[in-house]
Image: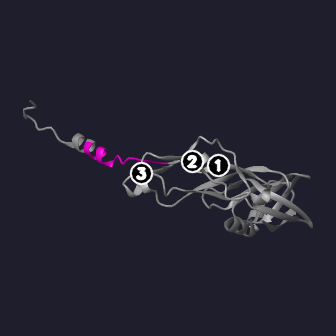
Amino acid sequence: MSVSLKASKREVRPRSLRNQLRHEGKVPAIVNGYKIESTPIAVDASQLEKVLRENGVNTVITLDLDGKKVNTLIHNYTSDTFKGNLTHVEFLSVNMKEVTEVEAEVVVVGEAIGVKEGGVLTQTLYNVTVAATPDNLPERVEIDVTDLKIGDAYTVADLKADGDYEITSDKEEQVVSVTEPQQEEETEEATEAAEPEVIGEDKE
């Protein structure tokens, strides 16, 4: 799957041109990679944000660059710390027949048996590396924890590739686990620590 986005070449100097573009509702960007020289471009900010909101960062974006079609992935981007809007984007031109690697979000689904029994579910890995041709790259990888009991854990090896992609992260890395609740022990320790000492009381 791919989506189209209009782009236009831009000047890089003076640097104030970047701010001017942002004021005009555009995002300064650059595209490089497969069969294209590094080219400074600009894209419409609202259109790009809509593409990312509806499709995610791993979707193939076909740039319409002055009439030339360039298949790209977003390689990197920066955003405003306070406003959250994009300030610069790096597009990577890709060969649609060549396998590439990106990160995909790990999403936990289901309610673990161990949680129903009072255990605590902890997720320790939130992203994994996946490999596929650009049009088969997933945005997320789900892991069903329904059968996870207290004391059990799932690793990357337990993740199922639901599509034409491969998960290439370390298979032994832990993703999620269910542990015994510690609240009762912590409460008892806190209570003992909070008990005041009575002056003159016989400690024997």
In the displayed structure, 80 sits above or below 174; it is: below
Q: Earlier in the sequence, mark 2 or mark 3?
A: 3
Looking at the rendering, which quadrant does residue 91 occupy?
bottom right
- Image quadrant where one finds the C terminus: top left
Q: Earlier in the sequence, mark 1 or mark 3?
A: 3
Which segment did they paint magenta? 177-188
In this figure, which residue is indicated by the disc labeled 1? 128
Query: Mark 1: which secondary structure?
Result: strand
In this figure, which residue is indicated by the disc labeled 3? 120
Q: Are marks 2 and 1 in contact (CB under 8 Å)?
A: yes
Query: Mark 3: which secondary structure?
Result: strand
Q: Residues within 10 Å of mark 3 (few under 14, many from 20)?
A: some
Q: Residue drawn at (47%, 60%), measured in percent from left and top?
A: 111
Q: Residue drawn at (92%, 52%), measured in percent from left and top?
A: 35
Q: Position of residue 195 (x, y in %)?
A: 19, 42
In the rendered structure, find residue 125 and report the number of the disc placed on it. 2
Q: Is residue 4 left or right of residue 171?
A: right
Instruction: Using the rendered image of the protein, determine whether residue 20 is visible from the camera's viewpoint.
Output: no
Q: Residues within 10 Å of mark 2 (few under 14, many from 20)?
A: some
Q: Residue drawn at (83%, 64%), measured in percent from left and top?
A: 62
